Amino acid sequence: MGCSSLSVLPSRIELIQRVPYQTTRVNNHRIAYLDVGQGPPLILIHGFGGSMWQWEHQYSVLAHTHRVIILDLLGSGLSDKPEEAYTPKHMVEFFRQFMDTLNIPRATLVGNSMGAGLAMAMA
């Protein structure tokens, strides 16, 4: 057939138990993120409609050599979902503020779909 079924999305409670996330505030919005490992910072950015959980099978291996940060972008997952425009310009500014909040002046960015676009815009 060539098609595979989608994996079952975890419930909010399962996600909280599986991914040891924390929160910070960016421009007065609560942002959920994971910060593990030591070494050069590596930020994994999910795509539109995604969340940090989609990286749960990669981050532990990457954390052997990097400080791995995975966030729920503004409007996604466990982060705040304000009623405002989510334009590319707005998301780039949000992401810069997120990096500043975590005191990360420079990082390797890995993105999926919209996250890749955000990573390219940050370059």
Image: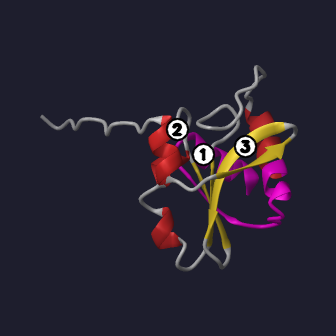
- Using the image, determine if residue 111 lies above or below residue 39: above
Callout count: 3
Residue at coordinates 62% horizontally, 38% vertically from top-left? 78
Q: Earlier in the sequence, mark 2 or mark 3?
A: 3
In this view, 81 is above or below 35: above
Q: Is residue 88 left or right of residue 46?
A: right
Q: Which residue is mark 3?
A: 31
Question: What amino acid is labelled 2 in the image?
Answer: Gly
Residue 100: mark: none
Between disc 1 and disc 3, whose residue precedes?
Answer: 3
Among numbered discs 1 and 2, the one appearing first in the sequence: 2
Secondary structure found at label 3? strand
**On the image, numbered disc 2 is attached to which residue?**
50
Q: How far across and down, in percent of the image, does residue 65 sit?
A: 56, 79
Rendered image quadrant of residue 57: bottom left
The amino acid at mark 1 is: Gly
Q: Is residue 45 magenta?
A: no
**Quadrant position of the C terminus in the picture:** bottom right
Q: Is residue 117 magenta?
A: yes
Residue that badge 1 annotates: 115
- CA separation, marks 1 and 2? 9 Å
Mark 1 and mark 3 in contact? Answer it, CB < 8 Å: no
Residue occupying the point 57% across, 56% down:
20
Quarter of the image with the N terminus is top left
Q: What's the amino acid at mark 3? A: Ile
The stretch in magenta equals 97-123
